[in-house]
Image (tube, grey):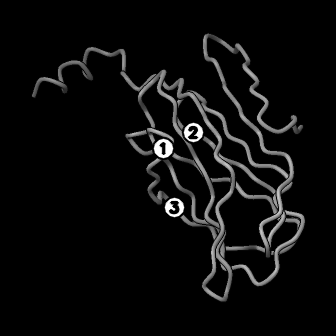
Amino acid sequence: MFWPVNYFRSVKYFNTILVMMVLVTSSFGNATLNGFSGYSDASRIIIQWNTSTENALVGFEVQRSTDGHTFFEIGFLHAQGQGSGYTFIDDSIIAKVSGRNYFYRLKIKDMDGNSQLSDVITIQSTLDVVPRTWGSLKALFK
């Protein structure tokens, strides 16, 4: 299911709020993205996108920011060809601060060494990473 450009959707699900921002269709020279979205679940942030065209692409560099301005590479997925769907899972410790907004974008790289940036999506982390067991609490103070 795809939503209009820059549309926020919030869903309440077992005390977890998922915030999704979706980019519907964008062309980037050698690639056309049909969807670029992300959401937070109980233990990670999931980024997904689909392509309708991919011409001479090397792949997609996934970048994350905590301020919306300075982005860092957090992963890379190789191009799989026209009409492919991609999923990137961000389960790094920095993405596990609940209630914080994270900004993601793709750097689309082609075989000629050129690259283009996608639009930015914003995802609010709803992760609960503090274990609720006595053993976990004792481990914090070792």
Q: Measured along the vertical axis of the image, is residue 9 above or below residue 85? A: above
Q: Measured along the vertical axis of the image, is residue 114 above or below residue 75? A: below
Q: CA distance from mark 1 to mark 2?
A: 6 Å
Question: What secondary structure is marked by label 2?
Answer: strand
Q: Earlier in the sequence, mark 1 or mark 3?
A: 3
In the rendered image, residue 138, in percent from the top left (x then y), is placed at 17, 20
Residues 74 and 26: in front is 26
Q: Residues within 10 Å of mark 2 (few under 14, many from 20)?
A: many
Instruction: Identify residue type, mark 3.
Output: Gly
The residue sitting at the top extreme is: 15
Residue at 48% across, 21% down: 99
Instruction: Identify residue type, mark 2.
Output: Ile
Q: Earlier in the sequence, mark 3 or mark 2?
A: 2
Residue at 57% across, 39% down: 45
Q: Quadrant of residue 54?
A: bottom right
In the rendered image, residue 82, in percent from the top left (x then y), is placed at 87, 72
Question: What secondary structure is marked by label 1?
Answer: loop
Report the label total.
Answer: 3
Residue at 84% across, 64% down: 32
Instruction: Identify residue type, mark 1.
Output: Asp
Say which residue label 3 marks.
75
Question: What secondary structure is marked by label 3?
Answer: strand
Callouts 1 and 2 close, C-beta under 8 Å:
yes
Say which residue label 2 marks.
45
Residues 70 and 84: in front is 70
- Numbered label attached to residue 91: 1
Q: Residues within 10 Å of mark 1 (few under 14, many from 20)?
A: few
**Closer to the camera: disc 1 or disc 3?**
3
